[in-house]
């Protein structure tokens, strides 16, 4: 089985992953005690996480221990820091990191954000799948999930799920022929 790089993320209906000042409070409107929207099943399919340093720093203001500290985690950063267990602060190129990870045996690779990392992966055709949970709210301003300036990419719909909370989860695959033409 080839390892896939999969984005699993939530966004507002108008395309924001955070309101100004990294405010994620809009996510609470779909929180249900007995509903994880497939997250636990997804996490069982991965053994590596990549995310941006700003996202990592924000997460660490919310929890005492990094939620993925038990698996290989690559924090993409411009400033070198010492590793913490399985958490590596990676200062190299993202294309090289993904190429290396895909040659290794293992489960899938989870892109946990943020927007800068997502857009770099899209720019280079490095995402294999996107699982996007759309929260039924228009926040109007903040951090956009998709930035301008990346190549046009057609996606193949794998599934669409609707939940009682109003959340809709869209699962797409980036077709191989599209990835082959992106340099």
Image (spheres, rainbow, N blue to C red):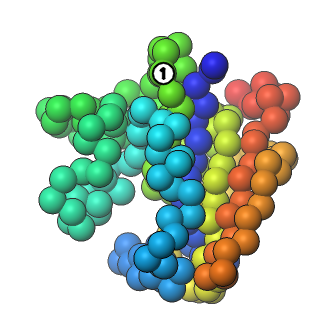
In-front residue for pair 89/79: 89
* Front position in the image: 83 or 81: 83
Snapshot quadrant of residue 11: bottom right
Say if 166 sits above or below 35 in the image: below
Can residue 118 be seen at all in this image of the molecule?
no
Q: How many labels were placed on the picture?
A: 1
Q: Position of residue 56 (x, y in %)?
A: 30, 53
Q: Is residue 8 above or below residue 160?
A: above
> Where's residue 114, x and y in %?
46, 55
Query: Left or right: 113 with respect to 159?
Result: left
Q: Which residue is most to the front?
A: 34
Residue at left 67%, top 74%? 163
* Residue drawn at x 43%, y 76% as measured from the top left: 33
Locate residue 147, reporting x and y percent: 62, 59
Are there few (<14), some (14-19), or many (20+) residues within 10 Å of tag 1? Answer: some
Q: Residue at x 24, y 51 (%)?
A: 66
Report the front residue among 172 and 183: 172
Identify the image quadrant of the N terminus. Answer: top right
Q: Residue at x 39, y 78 (%)?
A: 23
Residue 76 rendering spot, x and y as whole percentages: 36, 40
Q: Quadrant of the C terminus?
A: top right
Residue under label 1: 106
Say whether residue 114 is left or right of residue 64: right
Q: Is residue 15 above or below residue 104?
A: below
Task: Give the left or right position of residue 107, taking residue 64 as reference.
Answer: right
Give the secondary structure at mark 1: loop
Q: Is residue 37 visible?
A: yes
């Amino acid at each position: 089985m080839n390892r896939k790089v999969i984005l699993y993320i939530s966004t507002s209906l108008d395309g924001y992953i955070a309101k100004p000042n990294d405010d994620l409070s809009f996510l609470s409107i779909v929180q249900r005690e007995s509903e994880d929207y497939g997250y636990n099943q997804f996490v069982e399919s991965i053994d590596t996480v990549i995310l941006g340093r700003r996202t990592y720093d924000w997460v660490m203001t919310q929890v005492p221990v990094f939620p993925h500290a038990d698996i290989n985690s690559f924090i993409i950063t411009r400033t070198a820091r010492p590793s913490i267990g399985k958490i590596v602060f990676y200062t190299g190129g993202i294309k090289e990191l993904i190429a290396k990870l895909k040659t290794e045996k293992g489960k899938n690779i989870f892109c946990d954000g943020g927007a800068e990392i997502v857009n770099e992966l899209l720019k280079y055709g490095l995402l294999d799948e996107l699982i996007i949970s759309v929260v039924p709210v228009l926040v109007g301003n903040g951090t956009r999930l998709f930035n301008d300036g990346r190549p046009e990419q057609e996606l193949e719909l794998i599934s669409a799920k609707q939940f009682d909370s109003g959340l809709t989860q869209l699962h797409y695959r980036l077709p191989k022929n599209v990835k082959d033409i992106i340099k």
